[in-house]
Amino acid sequence: MEGDVMDKLGDMASVYDFDPITGNIPATKVEITVSLCVLYTQGVETKQWREFGRTEVIDNTLNPDFVRKYILDYFFEEKQNLRFDLYDVDSKSPDLSKHDFLGQAFCTLGEIVGSPASRLEKPLGGIAGKKCGSIILSAEELGNCRDSATMQFCANKLDKKDFFGKSDPFMVFYRSNEDGTFTICHKTEVVKNTLNPVWQSFTIAVRALCNGDFDRTIKIEVYDWDRDGSHDFIGEFTTSYRELARGQSQFNVYEVSVVTCTSLVDFSLSLLYPYFRTQINFTVAIDFTASNGNPSQSTSLHYMNPYQMNAYAMALKAVGEIIQDYDSDKMFPALGFGAKLPPDGRVSHEFPLNGDIENPYCNGIDGILEAYHESLKSVQLYGPTNFAPIVNHVASYAAAVQDGSQYFVLLIITDGVISDMAQTKEAIVNGAKLPMSIIIVGVGQAEFDAMVELDGDDIRVSSRGKLAERDIVQFVPFRDYMDRTGNHVLSMARLAKDVLAEIPDQLISYMKSRGVKPNPTPPAHTPPGHTHHTQI
């Protein structure tokens, strides 16, 4: 059953991006085309299936092509489970039990988006002993969800609020919500001791500023900064993204005293969706150093409890199950570091978990978990904890493909006691020029100060006086997602969401820095195979 794709690129998204249930602003919206079916989505926490929508009915055909599309909010960092139920409609009754069930298919939204040409064929099941045919699902992004704008403001003759000197003004930006409330989305820096400030230019996602609705109200407040936090209100004004996009003109002068939008350059950071026609190469690296504890003892972070996964396995499963949807062949190199290897006991900082130096690829997340379990039986935990060899290992492959066709994501799971900080910083600074991102999940109760430093959210990582070109590291401590006993993950979905949240913007920042434009034409489908063979 084949569906067509309605090309909406270039049209303004007509559905607001804000999700009132989760408070999230989705990465983008995609449109799914299916045939003769009811779409169900699954709640993240409750796991309950809820009907999302139905296609119209087309009479007397085994290959219907429907006009009605499903428009879903798409979050790269979440696992969004979908169910498609197909029916042969016998009457006008809305009761599905009155119609003949033809079969069903399950997938994630990420699987559709990550498939070659974003076209996924799934066999239909649900009827014992019967072949039910197949369903073809395709997705297309609705425009403007990933646009960003750079803007700069200045003001003239603001009210003097400080008794002994001039004001120290700053601006606060709010986007309006559907219920009439406002949500803060940006705050400028404070310009000290002036009534005529010129604030630095800043870049903000359009979806964060106005939820994709160019005419929605944007409220901007101006304050005089006070050290004790009791900032004095100077004034406010309202505008819209459409007005701001006119740039420096009489239309962008507002009475506060007078605030002027001195310039606004509206540029597209380009659309996330076409970039995810980029091949995502996912590599896992697991810490096998002695600081994790003896795997045979229950206190070890590597302890193999027969009744539940350890922290390493849980972190790998939570993140890997989402990111694997974007790797077409589902074959992943899985490496370990910091262990003595048989037969000679040499220490290695990049060894294959499956023991095969020529082909360290594992089949899916389950294959990685199996290789991890087996490796624990043969290697000896040792040390030191060196990150640089693994980072440089992935960087060597990223360096070979810098045209935007491939992007590399390295997941490091570690207990956080790092030994080669200087070398790792240098590796990260070098990797920031390449199409790669690094995710670090810290397990155990160690102090993760070094990991926070590598994350670079507050202070960009530097090495030998050189700042990293962009932030490519995301760190999360696993313990933040555990219950008080430390035995159960409160929310695997929240862990995966927080770990993966920065990947889309990191990927886009690389593409933009290299002038890579999104490819509107789906790439030709190539048979599954390994683009790169890791040599260790």
Image (cartoon, grey):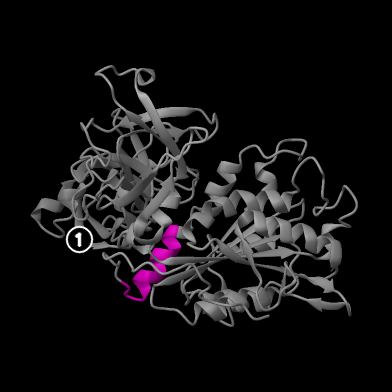
**Image quarter for residue 218?**
top left
Magenta range is 504-516
In this rendering, the answer to whether 168 lies above or below 354 is above
Q: Amino acid at mark 1?
A: Thr
Q: From the viewer's side, name the closer residue of 258 and 204.
A: 204
Point 33% across, 55% down: residue: 204
On screen, residue 248 versus residue 310, left or right, reads: left
What secondary structure predominates along the stretch shown in magenta? helix
Q: From the viewer's side, name the closer residue of 313 and 123.
A: 123
Image location (x, y in percent) of residue 18: 35, 39
Tell me if I can see residue 50 in this picture: yes
Image location (x, y in percent) of residue 74: 39, 46
Q: From the viewer's side, name the closer residue of 32 and 86.
A: 86
Q: Residues within 10 Å of mark 1 (few under 14, many from 20)?
A: some
Q: Is residue 514 magenta?
A: yes
- Tally of numbered discs: 1
Work out which residue is located at the far left of the displayed protein and give it: 250
Image location (x, y in percent) of residue 497: 52, 47
On screen, residue 523 versus residue 365, left or right, reads: left
Q: Is residue 94 magenta?
A: no
Image location (x, y in percent) of residue 195: 28, 55
Tell me if I can see residue 193 in this picture: no
Point 58% across, 78% down: residue: 533
Q: Which residue is mark 1?
A: 262
In this rendering, the answer to whether 527 lies above or below 23 is below
Query: Quick one: quadrant of the N terminus?
Result: top left
Q: From the viewer's side, name the closer residue of 218 and 41.
A: 41
Q: Secondary structure at mark 1?
A: strand
Query: Quick one: quadrant of the C terminus?
Result: bottom right
Point 82% across, 45% down: residue: 305
